[in-house]
Image (tube, rainbow, N blue to C red):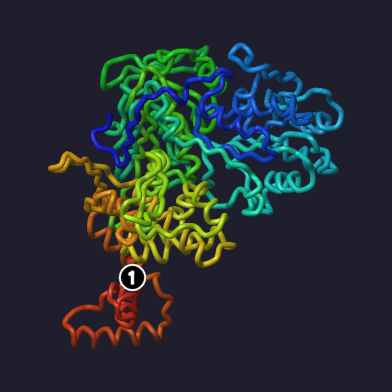
């Protein structure tokens, strides 16, 4: 286990998430099955929670009892289709097995053009009930179908729903919208990550409100495992080539997936094959390569143990490597995987203990998917680890702002994952000092605004993780973190701006309510719990928030809003980046604060000289005097312009 992680979450090994009921359903699947009569159902649940089987239970009920005649299951890529192949359910307590006619499993290799016509024929003529296809096949088939009513009494299930977009350019998103509005189709959408890297909403607000939502949290999943005790996120900062820093980050005693950087990224050497060779050298001495499986044997430098290593970067022989990975049956069959764009979504290697990822991944979805590879429950591990190697900027580097932006994205992504992985909490207003929580997850807060509309209530209950993702992807928020803006600016300006942008239909009052909840929820999930016994023998619980210990009975919204919810992101950056670089970053951000004309800059520069002569100090950007603030930012702009001129000489 890592000595110190940026994020560390511990679990109770209750076994609840993997135990099954009398119908053979896990806890998450039973929760989804309770909503089997919903026409539109959105399931948010983490990798390995059993979403594919949850779909089977619901689909079979709709076929048997709800007048649905056919079921189409769409997956983003062919390899994921195997999750929906024939599955025995009766022997575990359900009333029917899941059976797919092989001719309608369109995720099997070959005949892509004919697959589109097969789907069209399935809708119009076939007596078969279930079809499996890719998102692409569904898109192309939809364009061939002349009438949306062809989907009447059809259930369309879309796996990995975050691939869909409400954007007009998204064919699948448009198809889904039209099918919903112009037919009697039933829709079930499933995702392990509802975050889109491009921040594009998946559904329009109006369409999303039509869905019943079932959320099964990462904490519920991991807390309910039998073996996993803890999960950690850490960062290794390096300068120069990541290959030089890799030996210090690599632990060959752990079952590891190494994801090398995209060839277009600044971290890449631009030669992925040589990178794989260098990684093999960092692992140890090459002993052999199995011609039949493509698996390498390497003698570890650290332990002397013979390790089995899979290379998913090289195209040559990759198919037989993938075939080997599909059929491994024990922890001894594999030790390390080196990959580029593979071994992420839908990939199942339950014995994996750590993901070592080089360079920031530009999509929160991708980070969630990579983490999902190591958070399977397995008897060989008690701890799962995600370690991100991040390039540390040099103050002399022209691209310092870009490099820091990458670090900011990585750190804020980890804070978001901490929010997702933490236990659920329910915030409620404390009206009287004598009020007591009605449940273990309830936290009472004096002065907390209560949502006054169903719309605000729905966002607070269902959308906070997605809203936090939007907030942490906002450029102004990230710049605010890097500049270490005070809590009032972050909580009263930057966060509400994102809420307003994401939900333009909200009134100002609703924006205030949602903003307050998202700030309070973020602050309290980061808080550390402590307890003490007073002289009367009573146990008092305290929350440590930004170096303050607060009795849980004295929580006040004014106190919470005095804390920057993303302070930890700045703390991580400031601990790993030298002060000179931080000053350059802050100067660059300050320079963009106001859009001054040349005349304004000159006048403010002259005013600042007079100000300094009178007061004996430079203008302060944190002043309560607006003119002094403008002078301070004008000086920052001039300083930045001068620095850029010097860099270009």
Residue sitting at x 54%, y 24%: 316
Residue sitting at x 45%, y 37%: 271
Callout count: 1
Residue sitting at x 43%, y 82%: 597
Q: Would you identify the image quadrant in which residue 225 lies?
A: top left
- What secondary structure is marked by label 1? helix
Q: Nearer the viewer, residue 99 or 26?
A: 26
Q: Residue furthest left?
A: 535
In this view, 202 is above or below 483: above
In this view, 373 is above or below 200: above
Residue 530, given in percent of the width and then of the height, sits at 23, 42
In this view, 115 is above or below 100: below
Crowding near the residue tagged with mark 1, few <14, some 14–19, many ≥20 C-alpha atoms within 10 Å: some
Residue position marked by numbered label 1 in the rendering: 640
Q: Would you identify the image quadrant in which residue 367 lies?
A: top left
Residue 395, given in percent of the width and then of the height, sits at 28, 57
């Amino acid at each position: 286990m890592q000595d110190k992680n940026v994020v560390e979450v511990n679990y109770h090994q209750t076994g609840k998430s993997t135990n099954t009921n009398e119908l053979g359903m896990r806890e998450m699947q039973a929760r989804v099955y309770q909503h089997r009569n919903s026409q539109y159902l959105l399931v948010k649940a983490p990798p390995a929670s059993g979403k594919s089987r949850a779909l089977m239970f619901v689909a079979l009920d709709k076929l048997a009892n709800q007048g649905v005649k056919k079921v189409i299951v769409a997956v983003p890529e062919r390899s994921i289709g195997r999750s929906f192949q024939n599955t025995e359910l009766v022997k575990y307590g359900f009333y029917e097995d899941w059976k797919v006619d092989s001719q309608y499993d369109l995720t099997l290799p070959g005949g892509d053009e004919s697959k589109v016509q097969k789907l069209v024929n399935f809708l119009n003529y076939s007596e078969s009930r279930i079809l499996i296809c890719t998102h692409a096949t569904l898109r192309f088939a939809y364009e061939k179908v002349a009438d949306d009513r062809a989907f009447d009494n059809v259930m369309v299930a879309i796996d990995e729903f975050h691939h869909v977009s409400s954007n007009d350019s998204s064919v699948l998103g448009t198809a889904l919208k039209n099918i919903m509005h112009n037919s009697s189709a039933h829709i079930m959408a499933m995702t392990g990550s509802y975050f889109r890297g491009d921040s594009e909403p998946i559904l329009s607000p109006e369409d999303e409100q039509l869905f019943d939502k079932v959320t099964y949290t990462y904490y519920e999943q991991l807390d309910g495992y039998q073996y996993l005790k803890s999960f950690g996120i850490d960062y290794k900062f390096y300068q120069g080539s990541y290959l030089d820093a890799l030996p210090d980050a690599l632990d060959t005693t752990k079952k590891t997936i190494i994801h090398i950087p995209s060839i277009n990224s600044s971290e890449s050497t631009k030669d992925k094959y040589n990178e794989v060779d260098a990684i093999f050298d960092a692992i140890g001495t090459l002993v052999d390569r199995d011609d039949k499986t493509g698996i390498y044997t390497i003698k570890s430098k650290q332990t002397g143990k013979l390790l089995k290593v899979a290379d998913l970067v090289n195209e040559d022989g990759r198919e037989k490597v993938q075939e080997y990975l599909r059929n491994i049956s024990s922890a001894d069959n594999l030790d390390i995987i080196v990959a580029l764009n593979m071994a992420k979504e839908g990939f199942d290697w339950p014995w994996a203990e750590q993901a070592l990822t080089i360079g920031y991944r530009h999509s929160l979805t991708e980070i969630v998917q990579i983490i999902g590879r190591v958070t399977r429950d397995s008897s060989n591990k008690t701890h799962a680890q995600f370690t991100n190697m991040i390039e540390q900027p040099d103050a002399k580097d022209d691209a310092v702002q870009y490099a820091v932006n990458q670090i900011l994205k990585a750190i804020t992504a980890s804070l978001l994952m901490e929010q997702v992985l933490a236990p659920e909490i329910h915030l409620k207003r404390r009206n009287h000092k004598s009020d007591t929580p009605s449940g273990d997850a309830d936290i009472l807060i004096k002065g907390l605004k209560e949502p006054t509309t169903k719309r605000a209530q729905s966002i607070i209950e269902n959308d906070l993780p997605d809203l936090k993702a939007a907030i942490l992807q906002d450029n102004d928020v990230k710049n605010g973190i890097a500049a270490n803006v005070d809590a009032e600016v972050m909580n009263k300006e930057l966060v509400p701006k994102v809420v307003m942008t994401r939900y333009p239909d909200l009134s100002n009052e609703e924006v205030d309510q949602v903003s307050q909840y998202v700030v309070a929820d973020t602050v309290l999930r980061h808080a550390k719990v402590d307890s003490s016994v007073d002289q009367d023998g009573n146990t008092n619980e305290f929350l440590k928030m930004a170096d303050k210990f607060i009795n849980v009975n004295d929580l006040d919204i004014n106190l919470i809003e005095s804390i920057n919810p993303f302070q930890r992101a700045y703390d991580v950056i400031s601990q790993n980046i030298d002060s000179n670089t931080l000053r350059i970053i802050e100067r660059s951000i300050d320079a963009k604060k106001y859009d001054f004309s040349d005349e304004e800059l000159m006048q403010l520069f002259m005013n600042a000289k007079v100000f300094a002569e009178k007061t004996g100090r430079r203008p302060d950007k944190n002043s309560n005097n607006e003119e002094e603030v403008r002078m301070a930012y004008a000086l920052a702009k001039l300083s930045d312009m001068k620095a850029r001129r010097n860099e270009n000489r």
